[in-house]
Image: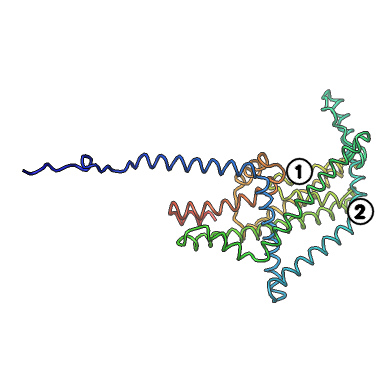
Amino acid sequence: MNEPVRSPDTAGTRRPDTSSRWSLTSILVAMAAGAGLFLAWQTAGTLLLIFAGLLFAAFLDACTRGLAFVVPIARPWRLAIVCVLLALGSAWLLAWSSYSLIGQADSLVRLIGEQLRILRGELRSLGITPPPGAEGPRTLGQLLLPDPGVLFGHAYTAFNLATGLLGTAVVVIFIGLFAAADPEAYRQGALRLFSLDRRRRIGEVLDEMAEVLRWWLVGQLGAVVVIAVTTWIGLALLGVPGALLLGLQAGLVNFIPYLGPVIGAIPILLAAMAQGTSMVIWAMGVHLVIQTLEGYVLAPMIQRRVVAMSPVLTLAAVMLFGALFGALGVALATPLAALLRVAVLRLYVEDRLGDKQAGRSAG
């Protein structure tokens, strides 16, 4: 007698529940992503510090590559020459400008404090009550130590700040030196984290990101030097007090896209107010001409080699990173956004979505 054919279920073999496995995998992936985001949030300051070191490494690498056209010797020797020249240049600049900068800083603080008190009086005459404490310090000493009764408290705070800045600088310098000494070793180490079939593509993206970082940094440093020197010369010819210090701050705040020129104009405006309306107009005219030339001549030359980002994306990155990570986030927002943009275009738009034309046309 023939036995009935038993179905797979009645035979004791069950089909795997793929839906439950998929749900479990999704939950585990979500938990891992959440844990990774939480860890990144808790260590954001350290991660930004590491990125600052890599940024310094990109600068050293760019200088080392450029030196190869002048001195065709081995890379370690070229890197050593770059480091020695940077150290000697920094020491010379510090020795040359320290006395002048301290004197100009004290005079500039006195001048700006006086202008703030005049502005406070003008606001009161118009019936507007300025916020308390808006008079400003009278001297550089009052700016650094406003209350002599808490001298030791300020000294302790200044000591902590100085040691923190020194430690940060040491970490950034050593990360930059080690990464610039043998960048290929770190590149190969990063590629080993990916499967064999993806390593070539990831390597191409890493090379493009490194190129973007090098040219962005070189371009920004060039813009800082040009703006600082031209602002210093222009204000000095006009007779604005503290021209060297005003030029340095105008160049340094230029690292902040779009907002930097506005921030740099405020001290120039306050310093020029002491010499009348005509001096304010001339000083603002010099600042406007320099920033216009930088925006329409120097910046486009930089963007030919760097991924050009829209103003909305740049400002959004600056505001977001500034709100999350403070001053360090503001300083590093633009290069971080540029690298993330390259990664998204190449790995998501081109590889994941398959839209090669859109990825290349966007940069």
Residue sitting at 5 percent across and 43 percent down? 1
Nearest the viewer among 168 and 268 is: 168
Q: Could you say whether the residue bearing mark 1 is in a helix, strand or loop? A: helix
Q: Which residue lies furthest to the top in this view?
A: 127
In the drawing, what numbered circle is on residue 263?
1
Which residue in the protein does label 2 denote?
Answer: 100
* Residue 156 image offset from top left, x and y in percent: 86, 41
Residue sitting at 45 percent across and 52 percent down? 352
Quadrant in the picture for residue 296: bottom right
Quadrant in the picture for residue 130: top right
Q: Residue 204 vs residue 243: left or right?
A: left
Nearest the viewer among 239 and 30 is: 30
* Residue 214 image offset from top left, x and y in percent: 65, 60
Q: Residue 341 vs residue 8: left or right?
A: right
Packing grade of label 1 (10 A; few <14, some 14-19, many >=20) is some
Disc 2 residue type (three-letter): Ser
* Residue 276 image offset from top left, x and y in percent: 89, 41
